[in-house]
Image (cartoon, rainbow, N blue to C red):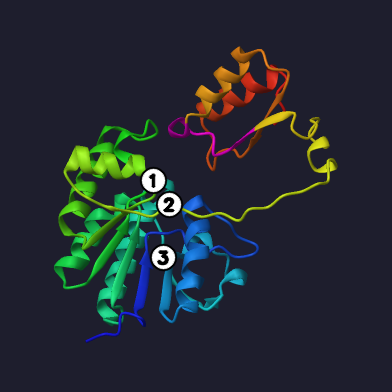
Amino acid sequence: MKDPARLRIGMLGLYGMPLPQLHFTGFETAFGEIAPRLVAAGHEVTIYCRGGQYPAQLRVSEHKGVRLKYVPSPGGKNLSGLVATFLSALHALAIGRYDLFFFVNVGMGHHAALCRIMGATVVMNVDGLDWKRAKWGLFARLYFRTAARSAILFCNRLITDAEAMRKIYLEEFGKETTMIAYGAYVESSENPEVVRQFGVEPAGYYLIASRLIPENHADLIMRGFLKSGTNKKLLIAGGANYDSPFHRSHSRSVGDQGAAL
């Protein structure tokens, strides 16, 4: 029987492993922290990376003890993730090396189902409710919904990252999940010049640290801020990794009201 303290883990569905010169989304930031800790705990971890995101000069075979495997990622912004993860799954199944397939993103539910049918042990961190996101068209939302169903039916274990998400999966799908919230480094600074460069004083501002996408509801915070009558400023740390009317309109609306961006 395989020693559970020394597993060989393949991680699929990510853009890849963050590098000093290369950063992606919050998902990659999280697993860029989790994977090295699993290695330190005695496991062997391989992250499958979308080759199109990595210039040749930045490709390394290992980072922080984590093995990196690069796969082709054709298909453009909307399909490259699905294609790359499918190729990753085929490779992972073919080499027969991993004790655990760890998928991220519920959109990879069909990929996870394939691996489970082929005999793999499969865990998935489902992330958000992609079938409800305004950025996707009808077909894409239907795909994400069916992918969620596949993940529920086939994965050995599902992981959610917030209590609200755990309740949604329980109430909407009748599926109990394991809730594991993300951690964070706690940092502080006593240098007032850090914030003064943005035109604010210490304790004289509110902060949004988020991508400007509809699902994060930054617009609700902005409207509440503008109606509050406060004399504080609103700082926004973040943007969007693609151009969108939501990002443009809300950047303008907040900026016009004197909030610091």
Residue 195 % position (x, y) = 78, 38
* Residue position marked by numbered label 1 in the rendering: 162
Q: Nearer the viewer, mark 3 or mark 2?
A: 2
User: Which residue is painted at 74% across and 32% down in the image?
Assistant: 203
Q: Is residue 106 left or right of residue 68?
A: left
Q: Circle 3 is placed at which residue position?
A: 72
Within 10 Å of disc 3 (Cα), the crowding (few <14, some 14-19, many 20+) is some
**Residue located 51% across and 31% down the image:** 244
For disc 1, the neighbor class at 10 Å (few under 14, some 14 to 19, many from 20) is some
Query: Which residue is at the front of the view, 234 or 12?
Result: 234
Label 3 and label 2: CA atoms lie apart by 31 Å
Q: Secondary structure at mark 2?
A: loop
- Residue 96 magenta-drawn? no
Q: Quadrant of the N terminus?
A: bottom left
Q: Which mark is residue 181?
A: 2
In the image, residue 141 above or below residue 260: below
N-term-proximal mark, 3 vs 2:
3
> What secondary structure is found at the residue carrying circle 3?
loop
Q: Which residues are magenta?
A: 207-216
